[in-house]
Amino acid sequence: MEQQYKDRLLSRIISGVTYIEISGIEYLLKEPYFDIKYRSSLVYEKFVNELKFFNILDNEEILGFLVYRGLWNDSDEQELKVCETNIEKLKVGIFESFSKSKERELARKALRKTESLQLDLLGRRHGFDYISIDHIAQTLKLQYLLLRSLYDIGGERVCGEDCLDTSSPFLNTLMELYTKNQITSENYRELARDNTWQDYWCAAKRESSLFGKASIEYTLEQRLLVSWSRLYDNIRQSSHIPSEDVINDNDALDGWLIVEGRNRKTEQNKHMASDILEKHPHLKNAEEIYLMADTAEDAKIINDLNSPVAKFIKKQRLDMIAAQGHVPHVMLPDVQQRLVGEFTQKRRG
């Protein structure tokens, strides 16, 4: 972003209002009061209940319609999951190869291509969501919030409680301008790193005051900017702090966050395994420990207790059993390898 645009966005966020112009007239959009937010939730529930009587599809029925018409299938769903996995891998790759510019940029190019594919798939998967009960009700809720948060330039509210007219060209224009003026996550990240904002942010932390009001009164934009700023603070306080170049590169920093998250999970699993052994000391010398899982989620947690080597051994065993049906324990590949190693060691001794 150019500095002038960053300064404008920052001023808008700090002020807590957004100026918009409709038919040559200026208006202000402000953060809705809590009673209006509460009322909007009631508006949503009211329309959900009413729409059910008009044979409008819910989200599950929309998916069923897509499958029935051949617009979505299991292969598409699997491809979408693969995209999510690959995006994570590519971001890690960008971080780990950051000092190798050619390798890094090849990974970035592949990332953009994968993100584009993911966007296409999501477009197909959710292309008919606009006719679902939830989407229609959410849109009506947003329209109510916008109208009740709209003020003239003199500070007077434009609309009363009962002014929601979904066919109004004014409301359609208001919705378009609201959508067009949304701040992207990329822009929030750049603003959070900006020197001008950092001056405000550091001063506010010393004075325990920001935006001149309690945190519960922050606008959505203010809360998002604060959230990103706290994230960058936490990153710079990490014991494995990345370089400033990595911090300023969104893809690489995402990769760093993924790696750090995996490392934390590994440490948590080690502590969990240690707790199990402390409670059952007779298991400390066991080659293998079997734990019962009541649910699929429990099974995943137990599987994650395995180290990468243990997971590889487990996969080897499962592949051999799947191929041969029954395999004696002594014939498992890792057991054979261990026995050969022990035999070799004895001969040397």
Image: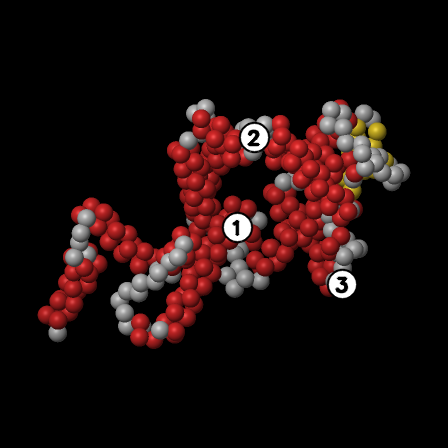
Nearer the viewer's eye, disc 3 or disc 2? 2
Q: CA distance from mark 1 to mark 2?
A: 40 Å
Which residue position is annotated with label 2? 57
Q: CA distance from mark 1 to mark 3?
A: 29 Å
| Residue 3 place in picture, x, y as percent | 69, 42
Q: Give the number of the disc on residue 253.
A: 1
Q: Give the number of the disc on residue 136.
A: none
Residue closest to the eye, 169 or 115: 169
Tag 1 near tag 3, CB within 8 Å: no
Q: How is the image coloured?
A: secondary structure
Which residue position is annotated with label 3? 207
| Residue 181 place in picture, x, y as percent | 70, 36
In the figure, is residue 266 to the left or right of 214? left
* Quadrant of the rendering where the C terminus is positioned: bottom left
User: Which of the two labelled residues, at mark 1 and mark 2, occupies the earlier sequence position?
Assistant: 2
Question: Residue 4 is drawn in which quadrant?
Answer: top right
